[in-house]
Amino acid sequence: MLPMMRRELVEKRGWLSDQELLDYYALSQAVPGIIATNTSTFAGFKRAGFKRAGFAGAFSATAGMIFPSLVVIIAIAVFFTSMQENIIVQKAFTGIRIAVAALLVITVKDLYQKSVHSILSGILVFTAFALIVFAGISPVPVILAGVICALIGTKAIGGKR
């Protein structure tokens, strides 16, 4: 979902910057729920103007993210048991997995290039990745440690980001 959200919200419509999308995505990982839905909620809230209209924007964005998936999931559930043994369906799912992996690699590369501006921040990104993927640490303490590092770094350079 991240590549599609980036293309739609940043590139096509210009509603968010890459940094805002990254911030919302990171925050969405720290709160309960589906990351893409949470990111959409934050983006809808921001787009609607933060105040009272922000809640309507958040609700609309959330509904817009959930409804199509709900329809597709219901349709798949109705036909899946009869189709799961079909070789064409199995090969289609294999192709979908490959396409999703490629989209994620491209998006992560683009977002990495736009958000990592120093050797120290690059080291922190790779450390966080290694802790989560290889050490099996939950993302929550890693994200909290990243927030602490960002706050310390901001203080060290005089409050500038």
Image (cartoon, rainbow, N blue to C red):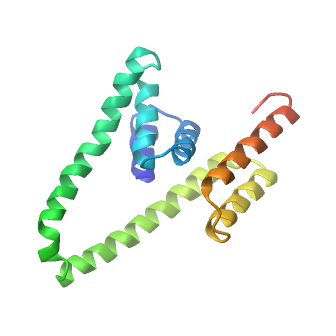
Left or right, 14 with respect to 56, comes to: right
Whole-percent x, y for residue 94 in the image: 33, 77
Left or right, 126 with respect to 84, comes to: right
Is 67 placed above or below 89 here?
above
Residue 14 in view (yes/no): no
Left or right, 94 with respect to 42, comes to: left
Is 154 placed above or below 70 here?
above
Say which residue appears at 77% left-offset and 36% top-offset.
151
Say which residue appears at 26% left-offset and 80% top-offset.
91
Say which residue appears at 29% left-offset and 37% top-offset.
63
Whole-percent x, y for residue 128 in the image: 69, 58
Say which residue appears at 76% left-offset and 42% top-offset.
148
Residue 3 in view (yes/no): yes
Whole-percent x, y for residue 160 in the image: 78, 29
Quadrant containing the C terminus is top right
Is 132 placed above or below 93 here?
above
Left or right, 92 with respect to 2, comes to: left
Whole-percent x, y for residue 124 in the image: 75, 55
Among the 4 quarters of the image, the one containing residue 57: top left
- Residue with the most extreme top position: 52
Please state the total of marks drawn on the protein image: 0
Instruction: Tell which of 127 and 135 is nearer to you.
Output: 135
Among the 4 quarters of the image, the one containing residue 138: bottom right
